[in-house]
Amino acid sequence: MPYDSNNIFAKILRGEIPCKKIAEDEFYLAFHDIQPCAPIHVLVIPKSAYKDVYDFNQNANPDEIIGFSKGINQVIELLNLRQDGFRLISNFGTYGGQEVPHYHVHLLGGKKLGPMLPSS
Ligand code: AMP
């Protein structure tokens, strides 16, 4: 399936809909999740059009990969997440439950997050 340029994060990148921006540079944009699951719940997305983590890791060029990784670290620093810790998640596909088909990572923190998944 090709990248869908009508997805909501593509619209945010084009400035067609607003976001609560935290930081950006030429490689990444970080903003607050609209439905936070923790006191800190930030999404970090690459500026380029990749569907998911696999697509990004497979097809992004080294500058994009390094720029995105450094961007995550910039957000970690900005929000002072290193001291108390955080969780970094990227959902993929049906089992992972990815809803928005533009690659993103969730940065979660601000409290002890507990087990990685609810036990079932
Ligand atoms: P995922 O299930 O990994 O694709 O996560 C998508 C995330 O995007 C969810 O946590 C949503 O709450 C979040 N989201 C959807 N629309 C927006 C938006 N307009 N601004 C910020 N976050 C959003």
Image (spheres, rainbow, N blue to C red):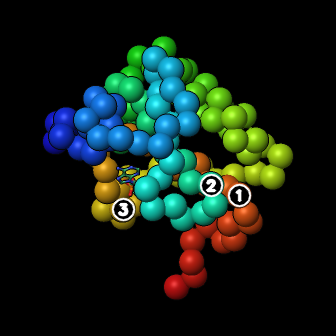
Q: x, y percentage for residue 34?
A: 43, 56
Which mark is first along the chain, 3 or 2? 2
* Image disc number at residue 12: none
The residue at which mark 2 appears reads as 40
Is there a contact, CB below 8 Å, between mark 2 and mark 1? yes
The residue at which mark 1 appears reads as 110
The residue type indicated by label 2 comes to Ile
Q: Residue at x 74, y 66 (%)?
A: 112
The residue type indicated by label 1 comes to Gly
The residue type indicated by label 3 comes to Gly
Q: x, y percentage for residue 35?
A: 45, 62
The residue at which mark 3 appears reads as 97
Location of ligand 1 given as a quarter of the image: bottom left
Q: Is residue 17 left or right of residue 5?
A: right
Residue 50 shows in the view: no
Q: Ligand 1 within 8 A of label 3's CB?
A: yes
